[in-house]
Image (cartoon, rainbow, N blue to C red):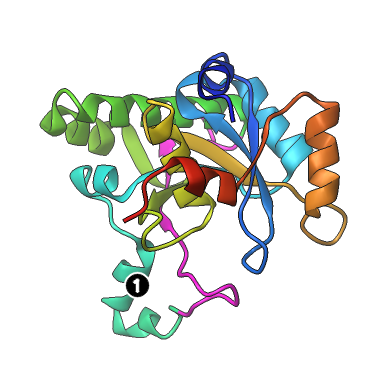
Amino acid sequence: MNRENLRNSLLSGLPVMVYDFDGREEEVDMVFYAGSVSWKSVYMLRKEAGGLICYVTGKEEGAKLGLGLITDELRSYQKYSRLVKRPVYGDEPAFAMWVNHMSTRTGISDEDRAKTILELHKTVELLRKDETSAKEKFFNEFMAPGHVPVLLSRGLEKRRGHTELTSSLMEYLGLERSVVIAEMLDERYSMKREKAENFAKSNGIPFITGKEILEVVRVA
């Protein structure tokens, strides 16, 4: 993993692909840095990956914006609490909220989702300068429900999904914990690792494993 090359590739708007672990989901996600997303990025995620297109940031960033994990929210409502269950791979989901930016039309087009993702990125960036303004921007400029799911990383010490892997990778590269991801799908099922690796090689996309990420980031 060449740190500088990978950072420059992401900043230029190119994707990487990340495989989690054998025995977990065993899935590959296509990943773009949210600060460099365009409608073409969303189109590629939709056409070439095919899974749910999600925005990822850290749980700490979410907390500063007033966002919590949806599993925790659902547990607080008696009529919904029984729906909170663990998936077969063991970890609870990382979903927080589904939003659209107020400047979008329906929110679902490639252009609209790119706009929502870019504005989410700007909001997370603003947290470093002025948390109050960032929170105001979030609640004033976004609406829920929308078409972009927001995922919050619990940190690799607690969960080792794509949410945590990709946000930790950005931190290692010196970038904001701010990415957009989608699972690579095939006919009927998720795309197998070997086929995803071949796709990455054919298209000049860096392919990174969860094991490689754990080797370069600190996990408490």
Left or right: 24 as drawn, with respect to 8:
right
Identify which residue, 65 or 103, lies in the foreground: 65
Quick check: 147 above or below 21?
above
Identify which residue, 160 or 188, lies in the foreground: 160
| Residue 132 visible to the viewer | yes
Where in the figure is residue 134, as x and y percent of width and height? 21, 30
Where in the figure is residue 206, as x and y percent of width and height? 68, 30
Where in the figure is residue 91, as x and y percent of width and height? 48, 70
Secondary structure, mark 1, is helix
- Quadrant where the N terminus lies? top right
Quick check: 85 above or below 134?
below
- Most common SS among magenta residues: loop
Left or right: 192 as drawn, with respect to 36:
right
Segment tinted magenta in the rendering: 85-108
Q: Which residue position is annotated with label 1?
A: 74
| Residue 104 visible to the viewer | no
- Number of numbered tags placed on the structure image: 1
Identify which residue, 138 or 62, lies in the foreground: 62
Residue at 31%, 69% (x, y): give it: 72
| 97 in the magenta segment | yes
Residue at 45%, 69% (x, y): give it: 92
Residue at 45%, 50% (x, y): give it: 164
Quick check: 5 above or below 199?
above
